[in-house]
Structures are given as structure tokens and as C-alpha cells.
Image: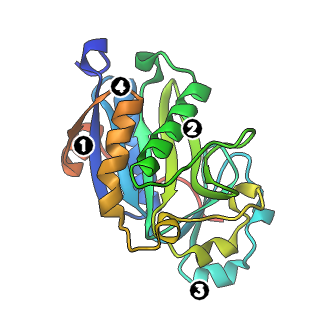
Amino acid sequence: MPGSPAARTARVVECGTMPYAQAWALQRALVAARQADRIDDTLLLVEHPPVITIGRAGRTANILAPRDLLAARGFDVYETERGGDVTYHGPGQLVGYPIVDLRALDEDVVRYVRLLEKTLIDALGQFGIAAMRVRGYTGVWVGEAKIAAIGVAVKRKVTMHGFALNVAPDLDHFAVINACGLGKPVTSMRRLLDRPVSVEEVQPVVARAFGAAFSMALAPIALETLRAAAGEVALPGRIR
């Protein structure tokens, strides 16, 4: 039964490339389904077309490019309910959206975020990348450069939004924002490893690290099966 302590299972969905608004709508539907105990904890793994999202603490001043330039380059901009400031998502970046009932895990939000950081640090370690936390900041770092951003929201103890790991994105795209409002450089696995690396290569490693960090067994589920369990919802948010 979903939510029972003995079941500690996370369903993993590799979504491929999905528009941000579509993934956001799916998350909201899954949160409602998890709150109603209709589904297990779920990890969505996805790539997005270029998009900028603004968190609850976000300031539009941290979007550095004019809106007409962003539109010409195909960048959507969304306000969201996640924590944090301004973040870029795009091709070559692995985005993870855990839909997790924190009551079943007996975790608070701060501990949950620390476990997401551990997930990514451990996964990067499998590739020989020594990543770390930096005191006072959320996310994962290699030296002075940020390699993964984290921003979450919690609705009646169920999580949404999550993490974004720079596998092999176009790092020039980050020039249109002040990433997370920090004024810090960003890096990627591709840059650090100095070899081609794909989201498809990294996905299973991150999924296994997530299962280990949260002490969950992993089980794949088809996207359409999950959608059927969650039901349909309208696309949320507004572009500004």
C-alpha cells in the first residue's frame, strides 16, 4: 500500500524531454495523488527545453537579458512556488522532481534538502567528481562553481520541484541570469570530465543514489501509467 512503512518504494519515471509547463502540471497532479495515497513516492527525471524559472525568493533583476532577446532565443520564463531565486533549465541538464511524502520518511524539509544534496554528491562521486556542500548555500558545488541547483516546495507534507544537475548543458545559456542570485560561476560534468557525457548515462546513477540516500527500493513505471493514476490537470503558472 502506498505510504506504508514496509513499502518504502520510489517509482522512477524517465520522461525524456518535456516542456516545463507540462512537467509542472504533472507534478501538481502527482502531489494530489500522493496526498490521497493513490501513488507511491515518485521520482521524475526529465530534460527541459530552455526555460528560466523564478522561485519564491526570486527577483526579476537576476534575469540579465531583455525579454525580447529571451523570446527570440526560445526561452520561456515562469514564476513558480519553489524555494530559491532564478534558475535556468535546458538541454543537457538532468532535472529531478521527487514527489515524496515527508511524513512517511519522518523527515523535515531541511533534512530532505540535505538528502537531495547527498544524492547528487554521491552520484557525482561515481564519475570521479569530488562535489560538496558549501555552508550557507543550498545546492552542490565543485570548488567555487555550482554544478547542481536545488529548489523545492512542500504541499501538505508532499514535495515537488527538486534538483537540476548540469550534465552537459550549454553553459553560455547561464549568462542570461544571475544563477540563484549568487553571482557565482557554474560548471558541468562535461567540463569537469573533459569528455562527452549524456543525461541518459547519468540518469540511472542519480536514481540509484536517490534510492540509497532515502533508503527506498526503486521500481520503474511508465509515464502514461503514472498520468492515469494522477488524473489530468490544467497547465499552471504564468509567463512574465
Residue bearing mark 4 = 215
Q: What amino acid type should be assigned to the residue bearing mark 1?
A: Leu
Q: What amino acid type should be assigned to the residue bearing mark 3?
A: Ala
Q: Secondary structure at mark 3?
A: helix
Q: Examine the rendered structure and indicate whether residue 217 appears above or below residue 60.
A: above
Q: Judge by depth and name the residue closer to the eye, 29 or 179.
A: 179
Residue 234 in sight in this render = no
In contact (CB < 8 Å): disc 1 and disc 2: no
Residue bearing mark 3 = 72
If you read the primary sequence from the N terminus, does the residue marked by circle 2 or circle 3 appear first? 3
If you read the primary sequence from the N terminus, does the residue marked by circle 3 or circle 4 appear first? 3
Residue bearing mark 1 = 226
For residue 9, which numbered disc appears in the image?
Answer: none
If you read the primary sequence from the N terminus, does the residue marked by circle 3 or circle 1 appear first? 3
- What is the crowding at mark 1: few (fewer than 14 residues within 10 Å), some, or many (at least 20)? some
Residue drawn at (19%, 48%) of the image:
222
Is 175 on the left-hand or right-hand side of 91?
A: right
Q: Quadrant of residue 240?
A: bottom right
Q: Mark 4 against mark 2, which lies toward the viewer? A: 4
Marks 4 and 2 sit apart, C-alpha to C-alpha, by: 21 Å
Residue 140 in sight in this render = yes
Q: Examine the rendered structure and indicate whether residue 62 appears above or below residue 153.
A: below
- What is the crowding at mark 4: few (fewer than 14 residues within 10 Å), some, or many (at least 20)? few
Q: Judge by depth and name the residue closer to the eye, 231 or 62.
A: 62
Q: Quadrant of residue 19?
A: bottom left
